[in-house]
């Protein structure tokens, strides 16, 4: 869920660092009605490679969840035609990659497991699986944990090994401090239901209650990790890919989510999401808008103008990209930290502070941040800010994003990081050792800073020009081939 710390400074200047010089973007298919090909993680996404100053090349389908080909090697050109044999082989491969147990089998095993005496409740650390007595012989040589209590079953994230591939699963789990703060905040704001999209530790915290007490809130976890299937019943967990809005257990799981969102005409529910930081913002935003549409289906006509409350937990340097898709969102100063991440910890100073923040459409003046951690209320901004975030009278805002005190640049007419200086060559503030000849922000086609390539008014002209260049190159290659055939008949 985290980017390497040594590249944060370069990422901070632009929410999509890879887009500056080259990168991959989600593309619109030529035929929107045509279904996308399937990989083991559901419908694939259409991508296109983009380079600075060069228009898009041939589009291709790839896995929506795995950006590393080692995790899922699906690849298909958009215009590629596959034989029936290859399609059949792909279907067999997709089935082989699914979990060994179905959702129904997991639930049946769980209900049997909780009926066992404490001494017979075992968990295989090697296979990451709850064991019934019939399984003991098969796992006899494995590393086992015994006497699994009801409390441990309620905290599966502490039994399971985190999957730490930041491009796919990225299970950097909330620290208790952040988890308790979020759960307490949601209760204070009056929510009765929480849709946790990729936030298993928060899901556990919400479900925790003292013996004899009734839980104030209910939670539904949507997560791609199939291992959670063995710890929850249908109404508490759905295996879900947040990059393509795919429910692995089909319509039944979709209905569980829909009923949860639409209960009481959609009142009292909030979505909290903690996506892998290696994922692209655009497919996430598309998925979240589909969940919002699902929620709106249960709204009465009088409430059609309302928004689904959302907490999107993501690094602060993606602020511009998130607000591009959700203009009503604002970023809170609260620093979210993680248990199993060496760098994203609370209490560090300078650039070592956690860059993870909460983006929300809830008015910031309604969200009280803990004063014991140094947060204070700015009466001018009408929101809680961090200790070092000073109000700038020139910008009329508390401008710091990273927890450090920023300084105002009168040439750029905005506040910048304390480590940045104004470069007269680039006519902007940047790191002292930056390259003035390096790629600039803005549109890849025309270079203007106020839009990206996908929104450029010259994109049609650029496409035609690049198409003509490709045709010219193809004609040249064909001519060379013909001449080679003449010389070697």
Image: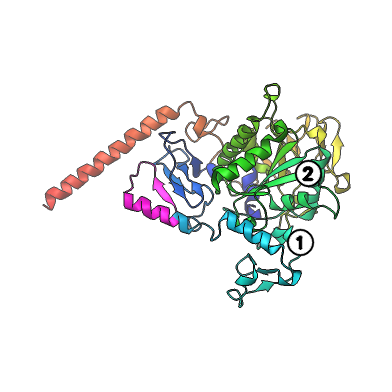
Q: Is residue 286 left or right of residue 328?
A: left
Tell which tag, 2 or 1, sits nearer the viewer: 1
Front-lying residue, 89 or 10: 89
Q: Is residue 14 left or right of residue 388?
A: left
Front-lying residue, 410 or 326: 326
Residue 426 point in image, percent of width and height: 59, 37
Q: Residue placed farthest to the right in the image?
A: 372
Residue range highlighted in magenta: 73-93
Q: Is residue 73 visible?
A: no
Q: Answer above or below: position of 476 versus 144.
A: above
Q: From mark 2 to mark 1, how far is it between C-alphas?
A: 20 Å
Q: Residue placed farthest to the top in the image?
A: 302
Instruction: Give the structural element (helix, strand or loop) at label 1.
Output: helix
Q: Quadrant of residue 312?
A: top right
Mark 2 and mark 1 lie on one chain; the one further toward the N terminus is: 1
Judging by the rendered image, the residue that carries numbered circle 1 is 150
Assess whether residue 373 is covered by the magenta stretch: no
Instruction: Give the structural element (helix, strand or loop) at label 2.
Output: loop
Front-lying residue, 274 or 429: 274
Whether pointer 2 and pointer 1 mark residues with C-beta atoms closer than 8 Å, the reply is no
- The crowding category of the residue bearing disc 2, from other C-alpha atoms within 10 Å (few below 14, some 14 to 19, many at least 20), is some
Colour setup of the view = rainbow
- The crowding category of the residue bearing disc 1, from other C-alpha atoms within 10 Å (few below 14, some 14 to 19, many at least 20), is few
Q: Is residue 357 visible?
A: yes
Residue drawn where x is 80% and y is 50% of the image: 180
| Image label count | 2
Residue 359 point in image, percent of width and height: 70, 39
Assess whether residue 80 is covered by the magenta stretch: yes
Residue drawn where x is 41% and y is 41% of the image: 59
Judging by the rendered image, the residue that carries numbered circle 2 is 217
Q: Residue placed farthest to the bottom in the image?
A: 141
Residue 354 point in image, percent of width and height: 73, 50
């Amino acid at each position: 869920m985290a980017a390497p710390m040594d590249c944060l400074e370069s990422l901070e200047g632009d929410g999509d660092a890879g887009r500056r010089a080259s990168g991959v973007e989600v593309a619109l298919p030529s035929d929107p009605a045509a279904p996308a090909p399937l990989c083991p993680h559901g419908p694939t996404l259409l991508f296109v490679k983009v380079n600075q100053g060069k228009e898009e090349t041939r589009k291709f389908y790839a896995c929506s969840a795995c950006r590393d080909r080692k995790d899922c090697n699906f690849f298909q050109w958009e215009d590629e035609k596959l034989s029936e044999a290859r399609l059949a082989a792909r279907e067999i491969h997709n089935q082989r990659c699914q979990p060994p147990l179905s959702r129904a089998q997991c639930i049946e095993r769980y209900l049997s497991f909780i009926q066992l005496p404490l001494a017979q409740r075992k968990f295989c650390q090697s296979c990451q699986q709850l064991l019934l007595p019939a399984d003991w012989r098969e796992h006899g040589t494995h590393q086992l944990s015994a006497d699994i209590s009801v409390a441990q079953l309620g905290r599966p994230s502490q039994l399971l090994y985190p999957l730490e591939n930041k491009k796919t699963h990225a299970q950097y789990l909330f620290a208790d401090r952040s988890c308790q703060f979020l759960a307490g905040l949601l209760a204070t704001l009056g929510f009765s239901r929480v849709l946790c999209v990729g936030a298993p530790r928060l899901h556990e915290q919400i479900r925790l209650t003292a013996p004899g007490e009734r839980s104030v809130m209910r939670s539904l976890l949507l997560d791609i990790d199939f291992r959670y299937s063995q710890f929850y019943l249908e109404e508490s967990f759905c295996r879900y890919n947040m990059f393509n809005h795919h429910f692995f257990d089909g319509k039944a799981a979709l209905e569980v989510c829909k009923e949860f969102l639409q209960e009481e005409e959609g009142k009292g529910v909030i979505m909290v999401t903690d996506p892998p930081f290696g994922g692209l913002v655009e497919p996430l935003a598309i998925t979240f808008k589909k969940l919002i549409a699902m929620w709106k289906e249960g709204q009465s006509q009088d409430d059609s103008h309302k928004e689904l409350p959302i907490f999107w937990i993501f690094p602060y340097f993606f602020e511009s990209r998130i607000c591009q898709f959700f203009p009503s969102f604002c970023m809170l100063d609260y620093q979210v930290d993680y248990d199993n991440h060496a760098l994203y910890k609370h209490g560090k100073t300078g650039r070592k502070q956690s860059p993870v923040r909460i983006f929300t459409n809830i008015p910031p003046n309604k969200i009280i941040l803990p004063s014991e951690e140094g947060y204070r209320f700015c009466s001018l901004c009408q929101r809680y800010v961090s200790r070092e975030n000073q109000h700038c009278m020139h910008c009329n805002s508390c401008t710091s994003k990273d927890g450090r005190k920023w300084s105002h640049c009168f040439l750029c007419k905005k506040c910048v990081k304390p480590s940045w200086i104004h470069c007269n060559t680039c006519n902007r503030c940047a790191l002292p050792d930056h390259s003035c000849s390096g790629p600039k922000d803005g549109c890849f086609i025309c270079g203007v800073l106020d839009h990206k390539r996908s929104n450029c008014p010259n994109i049609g002209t650029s496409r035609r020009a690049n198409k003509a260049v490709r045709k010219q190159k193809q004609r040249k290659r064909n001519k060379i081939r013909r001449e080679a055939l003449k010389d070697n008949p």
